[in-house]
Amino acid sequence: MADKKLICADCGKEFLFTEGEQQFYKEKGFENEPKRCPECRRARKQQRNQNRSRF
């Protein structure tokens, strides 16, 4: 398994899906590759957490 270059669905930036991350996804049973770069994933997670705390 080699590192893969992917394009973020949110910002359009190219990011690396490393061999280690691919192995982690496989171990967890995830079938899809990430659609967002680490920065956009972090921002999206933070926004979801803020929305939860309002209720």
Image (spheres, rainbow, N blue to C red):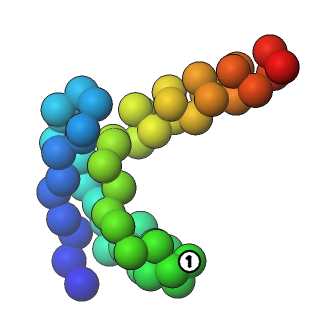
The residue at the point 70 percent across, 20 percent down is 50
The image quadrant of residue 49 is top right
Query: What's the residue at 56%, 77% (across, down)?
Result: 28
In the rendered image, the vertical position of residue 1 relative to residue 37, given as above or below: below
Image coordinates of residue 29 in percent, x first then y, are 51, 80
- On the image, the x and y values in percent for residue 13 come to 18, 34
Q: Camera-side residue: 52 or 4?
A: 52
Is 18 or 27 nearer to us in this picture?
A: 27
Question: Can you identify the residue that label 1 sits on?
Answer: 28
**Which residue extends farthest top?**
54
Q: Residue at x 58, y 35 (%)?
A: 45
Asked if one can make out residue 42 in the rendered structure from this viewpoint, the answer is: yes
- Check disc 1 and report its element: helix, strand or loop: helix
Q: Is residue 27 left or right of residue 20?
A: right
Which kind of residue does numbered mark 1 sit on?
A: Lys
Quadrant position of the C terminus in the picture: top right
- Crowdedness near tag 1: few (<14), some (14–19) or many (≥20) residues, C-alpha within 10 Å: few
**Which quarter of the rendered picture does the N terminus lie within?**
bottom left
Residue 20 shows up from this direction: no
Please provide percent x and percent y for residue 20. Answer: 41, 73
Residue at the outermost front position: 55
Residue 15 on image: x %, y %? 23, 46
Look at the picture and state if 15 lies above or below 53.
Answer: below
Query: In the rendered view, does 33 fall on the left or right side of 15?
Result: right
Place residue 46 in its image quadrant.
Answer: top right
Q: Nearer the viewer, residue 39 or 52?
A: 52
Q: Does residue 55 lie above or below 31 as drawn? A: above
Viewer-side residue, 52 vs 23: 52
Q: Residue at x 24, y 38 (%)?
A: 9
